[in-house]
Amino acid sequence: MGGRRSRNKGKAWEREVAILLREFWEDSRRGFQSRSGGDEADVEDTPFWVECKVGARPNTFAAFDQAEEASDGRPILIAIKRNAKNSHEDPSCFMAMRIENFLDLLNFILFQVNLF
């Protein structure tokens, strides 16, 4: 896939993820990206460093490495989508985070609803 088309696909996925996250953080938006991609997270105004990846076989581990290098200390959340999928509702679209961050989040949720 060509560079411009690939970038446009990535931008569209970043916008879709930002819109999805507005249900929880109303100001979430696509982050400002320079050509190097190092200015902001792909989606900003959330408590996470959100990195969005779309492709035939997105490399989750490379996405984590990229996010860790650029992160400002927020927990990393990777939004992944395969090329041919048209919507976030497709089962092949998913979010990934480090297990320690997931356990912290789960602990917070469970204490909020008094399940412990």
Image (cartoon, rainbow, N blue to C red):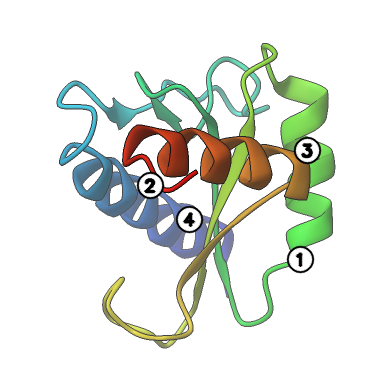
At label 1, the amino acid type is: Asn
Give the mark nearest the N terminus, 1 or 2. Answer: 2
Q: Position of residue 36 (x, y in %)?
A: 68, 27
Q: CB of mark 3 within 8 Å of CB of mark 1?
A: no
Q: Which residue is mark 1?
A: 59
Corner quadrant of residue 114: top left
**Secondary structure under the numbered disc 3 in the rendered image:** helix
Q: CA distance from mark 4 to mark 1?
A: 20 Å
Real-space Cα separation, disc 2 to disc 3, in angstroms: 16 Å
C-alpha distance separating marks 4 and 3: 21 Å
- N-terminal-most mark, 4 or 1: 4
Q: Is residue 70 above or below residue 14?
A: above
Q: Residue at x 44, y 35 (%)?
A: 111
Q: Amino acid at mark 2?
A: Glu
Q: Alpha carbon of mark 1 to alpha carbon of mark 2: how far?
A: 16 Å
- The reply, left or right, for residue 26 in relation to residue 53 is left
Q: Amino acid at mark 3?
A: Gln
Residue labelled with disc 3: 66
Residue 40 position within the rendered picture, expressed as x and y whole percent measured from the top left: 53, 18
Q: Which mark is residue 4?
A: 4
Query: Residue at horizontal 27%, vertical 78%?
Result: 89
